[in-house]
Image (cartoon, helix red, strand yellow):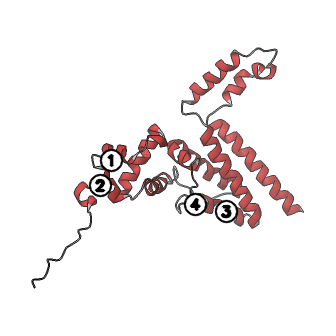
Amino acid sequence: MPSQPRTVKHQPGPRRRHGLTREQIAKAALDLIDAEGLDGLTMQRLAGSLGIGTMTLYGYFRSKDELLDAVIDAASEPEGSFTRQGPWREQLAELVRLNYRRLVRHPALVQIRLRRPILRPRSLRFGETILAILHEAGFGAEEAAGAFRLIFTYVFGYAALSPQQTVEEQRRETAAAIALLPPEQYPHLTDTANEVSMAMAGENQFEYGLQRVLDGVEAAHGRQVAG
C-alpha cells in the first residue's frame, strides 16, 4: 500500500515577510496609546497602522496582554543616564526625576499601571535601584521597602493626575474656575488664586513634592537611627 505523503507544518515567518520585529510593533503600540489612550489600542487597529493583517499580528503576539507586556518593556527605559554618585538623597532625587520624565513622555505606562500591576523585570529595575541606594545608606529592609513604596506612589500618582493639556492651559483653567467662586464662601482660594493655579502642574511643583517626600524619609530614618 503506497505510503501517504508526509504533511509538513510550516512555521509562520512574519518577520521575514514583513520585515518587522516584536520591538518595532511594541513601539508602534506604545505610540498609539500615548497619542490616543489605552482604549484606542486594538489588535485590528494596530495591524492596520502597520500595514499588516490582524492574524499576522497574532503571529507576533498571542494576545493583547502579551502585547501590553512588550509595550511596558518599550516604555521602561529611563530618560537620560543615571550615575550612582553623591549622597543617597541626591541619588534618589535624580533617579526619581528621570523616571518621572519617562512617565510624562509615555503616559501609556501610567494608563496601563492604573488597570493592572506592572511587574516586568525591566520596569522593576526602578525599585531595585531605589532599594540598593537605601540599603547602602543604612536603611533596614522594612524601612527601605516602605520608603520605596512611598516614592513609587508619589511618582506614579503625580503623573497619573497630571493633565493631558499643557501646564499653561491647566493653570488658566484653574484660575478661571476660581475666579467664578464667591469670595465670601471661598476666601482662601480666591485670595491665593494665582498661587494655587501655579501649583497645579509642572516640574516645579513635582520637585516641591519630591523634596517633601524625601524630607519625610530622611527624618524618619534619622529617628530610627537615633532610637
- Distance between the Cα atoms at labels 3 and 4? 11 Å
Taking the view exactly as shown, the residue that stands out farthest to the left is 2
- Distance between the Cα atoms at labels 1 and 2? 8 Å
Tag 3 secondary structure: helix
Tag 4 secondary structure: loop
Question: Is the C terminus in the top left, top right, bottom left or bottom right quadrant?
Answer: bottom right
Q: Amino acid at mark 1?
A: Ala
- Distance between the Cα atoms at labels 2 and 4? 31 Å
Give the mark, 2 or 3, whose residue is nearer the N terminus: 2
> Mark 4 near mark 1, Cβ–Cβ under 8 Å?
no
Whether 84 is drawn above or below 193: the answer is below
Q: Amino acid at mark 3?
A: Leu
Dot 1 surroundings within 10 Å: few (below 14), some, or many (20 or more)? some
Question: Is the N terminus in the top left, top right, bottom left or bottom right quadrant?
Answer: bottom left
> Mark 2 near mark 4, Cβ–Cβ under 8 Å?
no
User: Mark 4 highlights which residue?
Assistant: 124
**Which numbered disc, 4 or 1, marks the residue closer to the eye?**
1
Give the mark, 1 or 2, whose residue is nearer the N terminus: 1
User: Mark 2 highlights which residue?
Assistant: 56
Dot 4 surroundings within 10 Å: few (below 14), some, or many (20 or more)? few
Whether 164 is drawn above or below 92: the answer is above
Question: Which label belongs to residue 47?
Answer: 1
User: Mark 3 highlights which residue?
Assistant: 131
> Mark 3 near mark 4, Cβ–Cβ under 8 Å?
no
